[in-house]
Amino acid sequence: MNWYIRRTLQALLTVYGVITFTFVLIRIMPGGPMESMRAQLIQQHQGSLTTEDMERINRIVETRVNIDPDQPLYTQYVDYVSSVLTGDLGQSTWHQAPVMDLLIERLPWTIFLMGSSITLSFALGITLGAIMAYKEGTILDVGLSSYSTFMTSVPYYVVAVLLVYFLGYQWDYFPIQGRMAPQTTPGLNYPFLAGVAYHLVLPVISVVITGMGGRALAMRGNSVRVMGDDFIRVARLRGLKPRTIAIQYVGRNALLPMYTNLMLAVGFMFGGAIILEEIFGYRGLGQLMYSSIGNRDLPLMMGCFLLITMTVVIALFIADLTYGKLDPRVQSGERHESF
Amino acid sequence: MSHSDGEPTPFERVAERETSRTDYYREILDRNVVAPLRILISDTRGLFGIGSILFFVFLGTVGVWLTNQPESTQYILLPPFQDAAHPLGTGRYGNDVLLQLIHSTPFMLQMIAGGAVYNITMAVIVGTFAGYKGGRIDEFLMTIVDMIIAVPALPLVIVLAVIFEPTNPIVVGIVITLPSWAGLSRALRSEVLSVRTHSYIEASRTMGLPTASILRHEIIPNLMPYIMINFVNAARRVIFASVGLYFLGVLPTSGIMNWGVIMNTAYETGSLYTLDTAHWIILPMIMVVWLSYGLIMFGQAADKVYNPRLRARHATTMTQETARTEEAES
């Protein structure tokens, strides 16, 4: 089968699998969201329940989670999947608004925050790793390696809390929360963009400072391995410029394995947005999901989960397609003899 | 086919050297416990790693047994290193911070062990099986694994934690790393791919050994260094995610002793506003970083343990001769 078609099918299958998973979680789990919501509504209702009351309660449950308890299970399932696919994620119980509207407003901010964190941590990590590899064995290499190893054992939220504490509360250099400067209008104007960048500094630093180390070590390892390969010796013997060898020969081959690293980082970082955004009071998707937990707003929580997952699946899909262009080997597909 | 004279048949041949039972056990102990420990200790990183791990295990067992439960006292927010009765100071409710840290350790350790063992078991079973079997089975398993990898772990874990509200440390450890085995199993699979066509594995297959025993006796021992490092990484993942979630208060915190819970209480009561109260939140952070750094150092040093040459040099029961044959075998 064509590699592109297979990859597309797989992405679609993942989306479908996640939607089914949320359905199972909401509908089938004993004591799960739907049952507890119904129990709550029944409890709120004083006195005896008539059939009409029951129906009214079922209606409310349906608008909130897109599942009508009256219908047979398979109809519930089909209804749920089709409404999610058409962008209807139900009604938030806390905000009294469609979940989708709440999410769409937050999504760009999270993509912006996490996108810049991922880009910066990879760019810096890769550069640092390449430098370390070229200075292998020197004090610089040993020092940076030990520093990187240590930084991989520090969770990003620890750095985040310390940064807020020192640069925010104690010395007042950076804002302690928010995503944009007050009294600015969103758009392409300087005060707004400067405010956004200013609020972005601390969260991005806390991700970059902790995430960079691991990437640098991985890049260092790859480069050192590639530098020992025969084709590098041949390139040197052919009298190519060291700069050309470093970038075109070593750099390119050392970078390709970093791609898997990037794939895993995308999911990890978008997931981490929940903790990061909460610490910095950054009003993005993660912070919305966190607040929905506090409010026991289960439709909103499920919506956030679905949207964060979709974002990651799409990001991985795009990354995969571009990787196929960089390294033609993956497209041929690796199929191994079966034992 | 005479049995009495000449060369004995292969069925009658006995070992030239007799080993008593105690000798046998001493040898096993020496090769599998003493020699690896010697290698670990001979390396600074290994010494630090194993020292840190033993320190935390000590804290979580003997430490808990020696000290009292942290209780509220009248000393509120005492700074550290001021009072001999409360060496690390106290929190907002007058709880001794040192006692809180000590009594949180058993929960942390159980959670880490639960999560790490679960992850490695799943990853090893799926990864080695898929990599060894190849073909359609491999394709099928890897499609599922890729789907799991694409789902961001933390939101999934939060959803599960909110719905199920786990409180048992081992269950918390497993729930927190529920999807993480997928990434590990993919990495293990590619390692298996590089050894599956080796001649000795081919030989076992030709002899018709069952897949399970080929995996157990031929493939997994080859991957041990790799598995060890991933075990340590899985343990770190449990620490990072669990402390983060307890810190946010996503997992049920009431009645649970955990470094993340201490950070949560400190954070919620405004420990960040002034320097006098910061020790309450910074000390648990130091514990987290210390334990995970110790684990990394242990993982790096453990790599050496599986180097047969080094192990032979450190084992006393091994002569140069047996060491060389062992080396040739692996």
Image (spheres, rainbow, N blue to C red):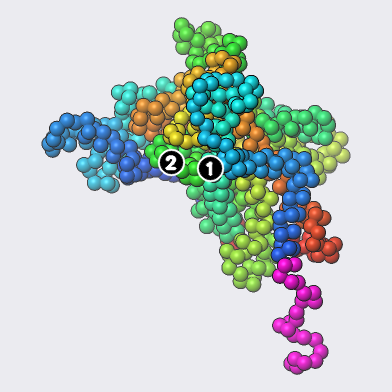
Q: Are marks 1 and 2 on the same chain?
A: yes
- Kindly tell me whether residue A327 is visible in this rendering: no
Question: In front here: B139 or B59?
Answer: B59
**Disc 1 element:** helix
Quarter of the view holding residue A140: top right
- Left or right of A114? Residue B25 is right
Residue at mark 1: B111
In the figure, A85 relative to B305: above or below?
above
What residue range appears in magenta?
B1-23
Q: Amino acid at mark 1?
A: Met
Please name the residue shown 83% across and 31% down the image.
A138
Chain letter of the residue carrying label 2: B
Residue at mark 2: B166
The mark nearer the N terminus, 1 or 2, is 1
Quarter of the view holding residue B29: bottom right
Residue A222, horizontal then vertical, whole percent = 72, 39
Chain letter of the residue carrying label 1: B
- Left or right of B235? Residue B46 is right
